[in-house]
Image (cartoon, rainbow, N blue to C red):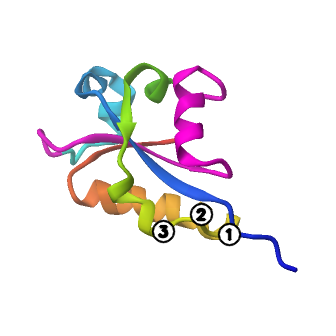
Amino acid sequence: MPRRHHHHVYVVELASDVWYEPRFRKANPDYVRGKPCVYVGMTGLDPDLRFDRHKAGIQGNRFVTQYGLRLLPELYAVYNPMPYAAACEMEVELGIALREAGYGVWQA
C-alpha cells in the first residue's frame, strides 16, 4: 500500500518590523508597502506543529522565530497534503506567486 502523502507547504505572516532587516529588504526589491511580509516553507510535519517549532527555535528560521505572527492557511491549505517532490516545487512556486503579488517573501 503506498504511503500517504504527508508533506505541506505553509505560509507564516511576519511582523512588519522584518522590513528593517537588510537581508529581507534586499531579497524583496519589488515589495509593495502595506502588503504582508511572509515566510514560505515546506515540512513533513503538520504546519501548526512546524510553526510552534520555529517559534521555540527548534530548527527555526530566524525571521520566523523573531517576527512570526501566525500561519496564513488561506494561502496554502488548498495544496496540502502532497508528495515530497511536489511540496519542494510548490514551496518555490508559492513564493514566486506571492512576490509577484507584492508580498515581502523569505524562503530558507
Residue located at (57% from left, 57% from top)? 8
State how far apart marks 2 and 3 are (Cα).
9 Å
Q: Which circle marks residue 87 in the picture?
A: 2
Say above or below: 91 vs 29.
below
Q: Which circle marks residue 83 in the picture?
A: 1
State how far apart marks 1 and 2 are (Cα).
6 Å
Quarter of the image with the N terminus is bottom right
Going from N to C along the chain, the mark reached first, 2 or 3, is: 3
State how far apart marks 1 and 3 are (Cα).
11 Å
**Residue at the spot of label 3:** 79
Across and down, in percent, residue 79 comes to 48, 68
Question: What element does badge 1 sit on?
Answer: loop
Question: Quick check: 86 left or right of 73?
Answer: right
Quarter of the image with the C terminus is top right
**Span highlighted in magenta in the image:** 32-61
Check whether the beta carbons of the residues at disc 1 and disc 3 lie within 8 A of each other. Answer: no
Question: What element does badge 3 sit on?
Answer: helix
Residue located at (53% from left, 65% from top)? 80
